[in-house]
Amino acid sequence: MNIGIIGLGLIGGSIGLKLKKSNFGDKFIGMDYNHDNALNALKLGIVDEIIPLKDLVMQSSLIILSIPVDGIKKILPSILNKISINTVILDTGSTKKTICNSIRYHPKRNRFVATHPIAGIEKSGPISASTDLFYNKNCIICDSELSDPDAIYIVKKIYSIMGMEMIYVTSEEHDMYIAYVSHLPHVISFSLANTVLKKFEKRKEIINNMMGSGLYSTTRLAKSKAETWLPIFMSNRENIIQSINFYIDSLEDVRNYLLKKKFNKIFQYIKRANDIKDNKKYV
Amino acid sequence: MNIGIIGLGLIGGSIGLKLKKSNFGDKFIGMDYNHDNALNALKLGIVDEIIPLKDLVMQSSLIILSIPVDGIKKILPSILNKISINTVILDTGSTKKTICNSIRYHPKRNRFVATHPIAGIEKSGPISASTDLFYNKNCIICDSELSDPDAIYIVKKIYSIMGMEMIYVTSEEHDMYIAYVSHLPHVISFSLANTVLKKFEKRKEIINNMMGSGLYSTTRLAKSKAETWLPIFMSNRENIIQSINFYIDSLEDVRNYLLKKKFNKIFQYIKRANDIKDNKKYV
């Protein structure tokens, strides 16, 4: 079985590395719109060959689509047009509704499986790829009833090799949930970085002198790439706006408690927040 | 030299452990308003003896005051009343202005050194104390011109043993700076935890299923203790309110870009945030 990987960054690169190491598949072919990524992926042995998109689509039995979400939405319909009825294609995009909607009535919708392996980090590119990036993490599979059982079977097999646990939800639920647990934290982190950078614009050494591990944690996501995150924000715009609204409400609550010296309310607000539990997989 | 530690939690406990291990000082005496903390500190060898506050103050040449900031403000004047003119007292509170103001005109102000070792973690208590908590971190020393040179000398020596680098600012500057780099990140994290917990109140398993490392980072501080943080928020209220205002402005900017589909603005907003640099000491 030939495996074609479109997008040889952190995610596509890590899947390629792990499948190859596990002797799953015969030949790994790939392409990336970023020439450096393609060259590095070849050098690192993530793929055996870099070939044009058209050829990759014709020659692969399994296609892994791991490019930014706007790119997926753009090329997925034309890829589906060209594949044989036995080919399986999966995507790894961080939003799912606009992607699934874009091919909802495509005659080969059933060959596509919409997935979101929850394993991104703020680093990017094939040089950051690793075989254990996905190990013991969750993979969300969306609208699985719209995919053929054999397509679901192979996708589950791939993610099992990666060491992932499968979770099934609709693409609509996925986008709403993920807005709160991933997209909102990114907005929060970008905004905190911008607030601090602006406040100390003329005295940047202050940030470095006073920064503790608290600022480090809360601005870790602020290093994430604009090329990845702008398309995510665009495609999950309404859920993200709603999550920002709720979040500003919460900030305004605590600001009002401070303004009115309602210290008992602040105490309860902190105690409630203490209830957040870590998912040990991601610690 | 007898060293007296008032407050045997994470900070006081870690200082005690490290000084003892470095054979600095002769006898370590301590007290904690929390009986369990006092007993655990004794068991862990952080102090040699637990004695009443009054006796500790009389018997120590160096007093380390590492209790919540409201407690420091409350007992510092009466401790200064009782110490000899050779005793040195330092505090480790996370806010400095109200503490420094509370003894600004005390006749023994010169025996006090206001410090803030930037090394807190979300864990607490003497059982979390460690000798390397402070290693290679920054320690802020405030209003140092109001302390006697010999007092500054001994405090610098202690923090050097801990492996810290000293930074000098006024207590007023400290509180303004730290509002942005520490207190605001805590507010942000508490609010995010509360937003997510409220949103998924009836389906808590969703948080666990969908949570990635992003939510983990941004809610790490949300596990911090209300007993520590309420007094910090109270004593740095105005700076924190100002920082929340600036922060909400930044969130409203990105919300407006999303509402008006100003995607180029979002791209620039992310790119600007990418400029935040880690202080390698705290990574």
Image (tube, coloured by chain):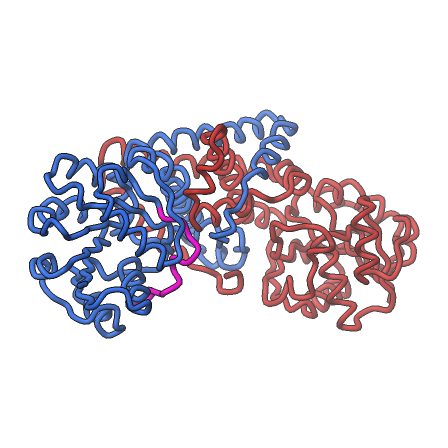
Chain colours: A red, B blue
| Residue A86 visible in the picture | no
Image coordinates for residue B208, horizontal then vertical, percent: 49, 59
Q: Quadrant of the N terminus of chain B?
A: bottom left
Q: Magenta segment range?
A: B127-139
Image coordinates for residue B86, horizontal then vertical, percent: 14, 51
Image coordinates for residue B92, horizontal then vertical, percent: 27, 50
Image coordinates for residue A76, horizontal then vertical, percent: 79, 46
Q: Is residue A137 magenta?
A: no
Q: Nearer the viewer, residue B282 or A18?
A: B282
- The total number of labels drawn is 0
Query: Image point 64% across, 69% down: which residue?
Result: A163
Q: Quadrant of residue A141?
A: bottom right
Query: Image point 51% across, 27% down: which residue?
Result: B253
Question: Most extreme residue toward the bottom, as rendered?
Answer: B43
Q: Is residue B135 magenta?
A: yes
Q: Nearer the viewer, residue A277 or A87?
A: A277
Q: Say left or right for B181 vs A227.
A: left
- B74 over A252 or under it: above or below: below
- A111 over A264 or under it: above or below: below
Query: Image point 16% across, 62% down: which residue?
Result: B31
- For the stretch drawn in magenta, the main secondary structure is loop
Q: Nearer the viewer, residue A240 or B171?
A: B171
Q: Quadrant of residue B3?
A: bottom left
Query: Image point 52% across, 30% down: which residue?
Result: B255
| Residue B137 visible in the picture | yes
